[in-house]
Amino acid sequence: MNLRSLSFRLVAWYAGVLTAVFVLLGCLTFLFLRHYLEANLLDTQTRRARQIAGTLVAHAHRDTETTLAGEVENLYSPELNDRFIRISRADGEVVYASGAPRNELFVPGRVAALGGNFLEGSTRKVQQLPGAPLLIAAVPATGADGTLYRVEVGTSAAPVEDTLEQVLVMLAVGLPIAVAAAVAGGFLLVHRALEPVERIAIKAEEITQHSLSERLPVVPSGDELERLAESLNRMIARLEDAIRSSKQFVADASHELRTPLAVMRAELESLAQNASLGSETREALGSVLEEVARLGEIVESLFALSRLDAGDAGGGWQRLDLAELASTTAEQMSLLATDKDIRVSCELTPGLAVQGDRARLKQVIVNLLDNAIKYTARGGHIALSVRREGAWAVLEVTDDGIGIPPEALPQVFKRFFRVDSSRSREPGGAGLGLAIVKSICSAHGAEVEVQSTAGKGSTFRVRQPLASEPSRS
Ligand code: ADP
């Protein structure tokens, strides 16, 4: 799991905030409930104390206090009802005190006397034993003879504590379940919301300068991602326009240059034939002719590349025997090799049919052989082979020439790339030959790769899918 991903960070934040809110709410609910239940219980005790004060104490005289105690005992049976009742006189004398309750949750005799003003009512919480405290309400009462009394009624807060314990258990179980459910829902929501981002990223990876007509997927959700995808699509459209016009410019420029260059070349050649020219002028003319020829080659290469870029399928797509094409091409170029005393050996498996444009596939072999001859020293050796590898026809040109340094290997198929102008100036070339090879291969669904060791030689390998067997109908 990617901890830095947007979905993880969103869900983590969401889960954190939600847990904090839930815990806070749980604590507040718990505290509020405890306060409410205790207040309620104390309220009941106060009402009962007032009842005793109003109904029993109000009719008592100082000399009938024993009767009062008996009445309280009879009417309220505090021990049986787990209640604490105490009636004391203002002089501190206890007139009546209930006994130990049945539930034994408090010890009445150990409840300290309440000081303070006898005319004021009050409530208090007495923690006697470990466990629930004793909640006591005290109210003032006046006997029939004007004697001032205090009636205290209390009960254990155990039922409140039991309820709170249940609420606590409910919160402890419910909160994690609620958080987990909310987080799972949040995860699904975030995941669904961000799903288009993944699809946009995958598609964006696929779009190259050759597939700029494709567009990113747009989910009509009306959200920011739809806007982003649309903006990116408009940007791709602008890039497509810009690249198309720059390719068109190169195509137009190279096309327009071909004719004047051909005319210049013809004029210069006819000028060079003129016998009355001095040797210096003839030499200068020869070198200008060479440069014009080189310029012509570059323009032709650029024109070929621009047509390949435009997806021009070439003259005719046909089924052809790769070994036969390789052998004729090698034969036609044998003169170049003989000139440099280079031996060309062929190892060709006949009958390997591929689909393609003959002229362009021939161009691939010409460029590879031409390079092999250019970059191999006099007396060297070049091996040309065509063989089958599964469903592929593999054409290989191996030489024992100067090789290519490892740092230059990834670049050799780039346009206008030359390994080192000083080492290849002598044989010429503008760095377009291998770029053309690569473009033709791509147009034919073929792959081209190179292996080379500087100073030892190079091998260029073209792997092209074999043509399917023609149907014999
Ligand atoms: P160029 O027209 O300069 O030969 P290419 O595109 O055909 O351009 O080749 C690019 C560069 O790759 C060349 O400058 C050359 O240095 C290197 N290269 C190509 N083929 C070979 C080879 N067979 N042996 C050594 N270097 C080569």
Image (spheres, rainbow, N blue to C red):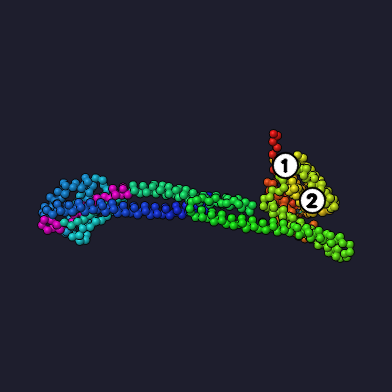
Q: Amino acid at mark 2?
A: Asp
What x and y, as percent, mark residue 69?
A: 15, 50
Query: Residue at 18% across / 54% down in the picture?
Result: 50
In the displayed orientation, state which residue is furthest to the right: 276
Task: Please name whichever residue, 227 or 426, is drawn nearer the observer in this view of the structure.
Answer: 227
Local crowd at mark 2 within 10 Å, few (<14), some, or many (≥20)?
many
Q: Position of residue 375 (x, y in %)?
A: 79, 54
Q: Residue at x 85, y 52 (%)?
A: 339
Magenta-tinted stretch:
142-164
Quadrant field for ligand 1: bottom right
Which image quadrant is residue 429 in? bottom right
Query: Amino acid under label 1?
Result: Arg
**Picture disc at residue 38:** none
| Residue nearer the viewer, 74 or 285 | 285
Which residue is labeled 2 in the image?
A: 400
Viewer-side label of 1, 2: 1
Judging by the rendered image, the residue that carries numbered circle 1 is 319
Q: Secondary structure at mark 1?
A: strand
Residue 384 in the image: state x and y as whole percent: 78, 46
SS at badge 2: loop
The image quadrant of residue 419 is: bottom right
Identify which residue is drawn at 20% across, 48% down: 78
